[in-house]
Amino acid sequence: MVESSLISYTRADIAYAASVNNGNLQLEAYTNADWAGSLTDRISTVEYCTLLEGNLVMWRSKKQSMVARSRAEVEVRAITHGICELLGIKIVLIDLKVKT
């Protein structure tokens, strides 16, 4: 049975979590965003990490190239980056014929 991807609000310091469970393997992504966090240029930072069976396989913190107009815009960017990474890892696992 395939459980669909879930996006949920977690805590104030970890904004969103996405989860994919295809039977055997649990693949999760956690995202966060810092809207206008840099005091010098007001550019936001997005952060995300991906876990496979609870083990960290990817972590990234990236300063954005432009100033965001709202906190929601930055959060959506962070979620997008996190889910893209989640799906990328899932594709690699499928290519490696790992039973998922």
Image (tube, rainbow, N blue to C red):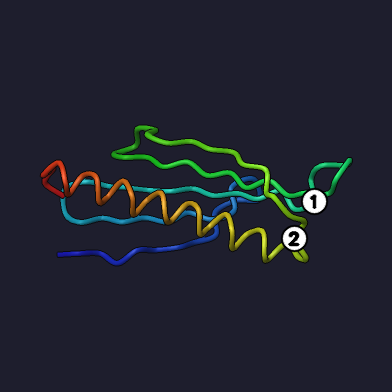
Q: Which mark is residue 36?
A: 1
Q: Can you tell which quarter of the image residue 76 is in?
A: bottom right
- Name the residue beneath numbered marker 2: 68
> Which quadrant of the view contains residue 75?
bottom right
SS class, disc 1:
loop
* Kind of residue sitting beneath label 1: Ala
How many numbered dots are placed on residues in this image?
2
Residue in view at x 48 percent, y 36 percent: 59
Looking at the image, which is closer to me, 62 or 79? 62
Horizontal and vertical percent position of residue 84: 42, 55
Mark 1 and mark 2 in contact (Cβ < 8 Å)? Answer: yes
Which residue sits at x=54%, y=54%?
A: 10
**Element marked by disc 2:** loop
Residue depicted at 37% across the width and 55% down the height: 19
- Residue 90 lies left or right of residue 1; in this view the side is right
* Quadrant in the picture for the N terminus: bottom left
Residue nearer the viewer, 18 or 64: 64
Q: Where residue 8 sits: x, y (%)? A: 49, 61
Height in image: 76 above or below 84?
A: below
Which of the marked residues, 2 or 1, is nearer the chain's N terminus?
1
